[in-house]
Image: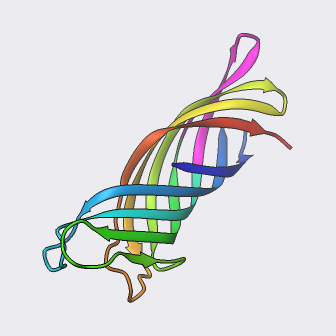
Amino acid sequence: MEWGLFYKHPLGNRIEVRVEARYAYRGIQASLPDDLPTVSAAVYEEFVEVPLLLSSVERVEFAERELRLILGAGLCYAVLTKQELSPNVGTGPPSELGFGDFQRLSWLLDGGLALDITRSRAVFAHFRVQRDVDTFAESNDVDVTRVYLTYGFYGGLEFGF
């Protein structure tokens, strides 16, 4: 589950830069290394992510409106805001991490379309693939740092100012 805001700025007629501020929540069943007292655990994580994308935009006429076809790539910085690790096997109690206990860096690919409704409003739908490259700045309390390969569809409304 994710939600966020973005700002895009044109760099010419067909290129734009986009920066986002996004909240991401992930809940997974994770296998843990053999040296930890449990075999698997439920991991619930919340992140604030800041993706930066460079995109190519192709504009076409569609039903008397402008349709934008967008293809982009970029990097994403993320900081952990909360992690709950609940062991499924073993006697260990649940553990919890807080804001800044570790950070992640990812690359991402993004493609989609946006249909202008008015001059300052549009609806959009995108497909995104994101792959974590590394985690860093782990605190001493960190037991598990997950790296993800995520993908999914997202959509919403654009409002121009």
For image coordinates 35% across by 70% down, the residue present is 85
Q: Residue 107's spot in the image, x, y percent?
A: 44, 56
Left or right of 6? Residue 99 is left
Q: Is residue 59 visible?
A: yes
Q: Residue 57's spot in the image, x, y percent?
A: 63, 34
Is 67 or 36 nearer to us in this picture?
A: 36
Seen as rendered, the residue at the extreme top is 63
The range drawn in magenta is 54-71
Left or right of 156? Residue 154 is left
For image coordinates 34% across by 56% down, the residue present is 28
Colour style of the rendered protein structure = rainbow
Q: Is residue 69 visible?
A: no
Q: Residue 129's spot in the image, x, y percent?
A: 42, 45
Seen as rendered, the residue at the extreme left is 34
Q: Quadrant of the C terminus?
A: top right
Left or right of 28? Residue 8 is right
Is 12 or 32 nearer to us in this picture?
A: 32
Left or right of 124? Residue 148 is left
Residue 68 covered by magenta stretch: yes
For image coordinates 45% across by 66% down, the residue present is 105
The relative height of residue 152 versus residue 54 in the rendered view (above or below) is above
Q: Residue 4's spot in the image, x, y percent?
A: 64, 51
Q: Quadrant of residue 62?
A: top right
The relative height of residue 92 versus residue 65 in the rendered view (above or below) is below
Magenta span: chief secondary structure: strand
Residue 49 covered by magenta stretch: no
Q: Quadrant of residue 147?
A: bottom left
The relative height of residue 33 versus residue 72 in the rendered view (above or below) is below
For image coordinates 38% across by 86% down, the residue present is 141
The relative height of residue 84 versus residue 5 in the rendered view (above or below) is below
Is 101 or 114 nearer to us in this picture?
A: 101
